[in-house]
Image: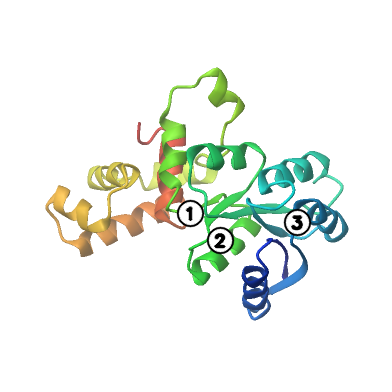
């Protein structure tokens, strides 16, 4: 399996150097380019066509959302390797989050994310999953729950619903009533401890329910489970 080729577009030199060093030390990852500005970053992306671009929103010339939008508009995944964009930022405002996804971002991470989780995000993004930092997942979930309007139609967030193979899996092994109750509480943002208190069960039992839910929905984490549950209609 070939390495995941990553480009870093980050204006803070120490942050960029730290990320580059961390990525280079990971087996199966390779930093193939870097930039400290948006315009230069666009040139680097065009020249290298990486698998994943880690793009900071707060760039000194054009911001990361504009970089994402321009690159996606001029990039043809039918004839060129498909580059995924992971937004890395300290902004958790609803406007920034939705604007990033509307521009074509594939993933969104807060800058205070743990390194191990960032590496997971890079790998998941490369694999084609929409990775959403748990710190801002509630913003996306609120967007999915909101009634469609002219504005939300234009700023839609593309999250995969249950794929046919998982629909078949759910028919064979459907969620139990208790698993559905657990899923509803996950969607509402409850922790395992809070779910255990609400359902009058142990945290260990909740962890078992969560594990079964993830397997049945074919997802890797609670955030993806919540998004897929809403999009598929399992939870309203």
Residue 236 sits in quarter: top left
Q: Secondary structure at mark 1?
A: loop
Query: Residue at image x 18%, y 55%?
Result: 196
Vertical position of residue 145 compared to residue 12: above or below: above
Label 3 crowd (10 A; few <14 / some 14-19 / many >=20)? many
- Which-is-in-front pick, marks 2 and 1? 1
Query: Residue at image x 67%, y 52%?
Result: 85
Distance in Å between CA atoms under marks 3 and 1: 24 Å
Q: Secondary structure at mark 3?
A: loop
Q: Which residue is mark 1?
A: 133
Label 2 crowd (10 A; few <14 / some 14-19 / many >=20)? many
Vertical position of residue 116 compared to residue 125: above or below: below
Quadrant (top left, top right, bottom left, bottom right) of the N terminus: bottom right
Residue 65 sits in quarter: top right
The spot of residue 95 in percent (x, y) is: 53, 37
Q: Residue furthest front?
A: 60
Query: Residue at image x 21%, y 53%?
Result: 194
Q: Which residue is mark 3?
A: 37
């Amino acid at each position: 399996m070939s390495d995941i080729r990553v480009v870093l577009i980050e204006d803070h030199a120490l942050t960029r150097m730290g990320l580059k060093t961390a990525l280079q030390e990971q087996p199966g990852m390779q930093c193939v380019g870097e930039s400290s500005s948006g315009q230069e970053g666009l040139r680097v992306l065009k020249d290298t066509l990486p698998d994943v671009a880690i793009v900071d929103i707060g760039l000194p010339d054009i911001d990361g959302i504009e970089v994402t939008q321009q690159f996606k508009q001029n990039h043809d995944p039918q004839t060129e390797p498909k580059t995924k964009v992971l937004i890395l930022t300290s902004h958790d405002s609803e406007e920034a989050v939705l604007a990033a996804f509307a521009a074509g971002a594939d993933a969104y991470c807060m800058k205070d994310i743990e390194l191990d989780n960032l590496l997971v995000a890079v790998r998941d993004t490369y694999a084609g999953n929409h990775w959403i930092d748990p710190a801002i997942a509630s913003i996306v979930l609120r967007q999915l729950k909101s009634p469609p309007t002219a504005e939300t139609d234009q700023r839609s967030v593309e999250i995969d619903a249950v794929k046919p193979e998982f629909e078949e899996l759910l028919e064979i092994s459907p969620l139990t009533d208790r698993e559905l109750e657990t899923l509803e509480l996950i969607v509402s943002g409850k922790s395992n401890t809070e779910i255990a208190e609400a359902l009058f069960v142990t945290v260990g039992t909740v962890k078992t329910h969560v594990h079964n839910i993830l397997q049945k929905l074919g997802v890797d984490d609670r955030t993806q489970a919540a998004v897929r549950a809403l999009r598929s209609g399992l939870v309203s």
